[in-house]
Amino acid sequence: MSMADYRKKGNIQETPFGYTLSVIGGKWKMLILYLLSENQPVRFNDMKRRLGTITFKTLSAQLKDLEADGMIIRKEYPQVPPKVEYSLTYKAETLLPILEQLCDWGEKNRSN
């Protein structure tokens, strides 16, 4: 089905583009995926430190969303203190070439 066919339906959220944005949209999700693509697995506190200004609550919510959408795997180890690691699923890895293209676009078009 082409984009023109989806446009006729009138609801962009029902398009493949709308689905994609629901999975990776927002300020943090693509950054989390990019971070995990560079370093796997990553523990919660390490991810928080590398992302900078994100709050614990926001990071936790974004990770839960990405896990629910099948983009990341959360592995919890039964120990004290708790150890939790995050890594990408195969589904997320299929998105990495597109994230690389977005990164290339940003490098070519950002103002210095």
Image (cartoon, grey):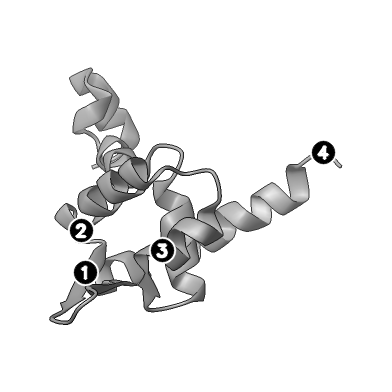
Q: Which residue in the structure is indicated by mark 4? A: 111
**93 to 23, vertically: above or below:** below
Circle 3: element type: helix
| Residue 78 image offset from top left, x and y in percent | 13, 81
* Badge nearest the viewer, 1 or 2: 1
Q: Earlier in the sequence, mark 2 or mark 3?
A: 3
Instruction: Give the mark nearer the N terminus: 1 vs 2.
Output: 2
Residue in the foreground of this view, choosing between 45 and 4: 45
Instruction: Give the quadrant of the C terminus.
Output: top right
Q: Residue furthest top?
A: 10
Disc assigned to residue 74: 1
Q: Report the residue at 19% width, 31% height from top.
A: 14
Amino acid at pointer 4: Ser
- 61 or 13, which lies in front? 61
Q: Residues within 10 Å of mark 2 (few under 14, many from 20)?
A: some
Q: Residues within 10 Å of mark 3 (few under 14, many from 20)?
A: few
Q: Please state if 81 lies on the left or on the right of 28 as rendered.
A: left
Relative to 52, 64 lies left or right: left
Tell me the kind of residue under disc 1: Arg
**What kind of element bears circle 4?**
loop
Question: How many angstroms separate mark 2 from mark 3 (CA)?
Answer: 17 Å
